[in-house]
Image (spheres, grey):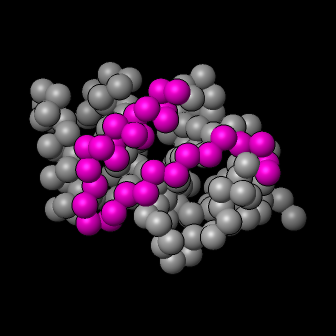
Amino acid sequence: MTTELSNIYNYLSVTPTIATAGQPTRAQFAAIAAAGYSVVINLAADDPPHALADEADVVRELGIEYFHIPIAWTAPTTENLEAFFAAMQRTREKKRFVHCIANMRASAFTFLYRVLIEGIEPDEAAPLLYQIWQPNPTWAAFIDDELERRDIEW
């Protein structure tokens, strides 16, 4: 049975080297590896429902570099964002697969990465964020605060 990336919950190809999604299954991680992704960045909080308890081992056994930056759903922080930026920059020459449970944290952080690090205009990057979700008040405020902190108007 072939596992397609598009079958991963809320999968979204952002660029040729960045994709985001909700929680992949064990088989889907194999498909991620087969698609050439060599980095997985997990932004889900510690021990969320539907997570793979041994995800780090599963991913590393596939030869994929693994980062886990746990982000509390109700309290994303600048420190979380900076850790994400560091992981993305450290691996910028590789294909990166960013996930959380439903692709809400992942899509928001990837939006901010594209705008604040890659210099994409917010209005250009926003449609992919909105394709996944309309950020709730907590996340909308976080995004706005991070843009404002860096003098980016949106």
Q: Nearer the viewer, residue 52 or 129?
A: 52
Which image quarter: residue 38?
Answer: top right
| Residue sitting at x 68%, y 65% | 54
Quadrant location of residue 23? bottom right
Q: Is residue 81 left or right of residue 146?
A: right
Q: Percent from the top left, x then y, of residue 110?
A: 41, 41
Q: Nearer the viewer, residue 118 or 79?
A: 79
From the viewer's perspective, is residue 108 above or below residue 71?
above
* Residue 111 visible (yes or no): no
Quadrant occupied by the N terminus: bottom right
Check if residue 88 falls in the magenta segment.
yes
Q: Position of residue 83 (x, y in %)?
A: 40, 40
Please state the horizontal and vertical placement of residue 9, each as a whole percent of the image: 56, 64
Please indicate whether residue 90 sits to the left or right of residue 36 in the image: left
Residue span colored magenta: 61-90
Figure check: 53 above or below 108: below
Task: Locate the C terminus by quadrant.
Answer: top left
Nearest to the observer: residue 39 or residue 139 = 39
Q: Is residue 72 magenta?
A: yes
Write the residue at 55% across / 46% down. 67
Q: How many marks?
A: 0
- In the orientation shown, which residue stands out farthest toward the bottom? 49
Residue 63: in sight, yes or no? Answer: yes
Query: Measured from the top left, where is residue 34 in percent x and y?
Result: 79, 44
Q: Is residue 36 above or below residue 105?
A: above
Residue 36 as seen in the image, left or right of residue 122: right
What's the residue at 18%, 35% (across, down)? 147
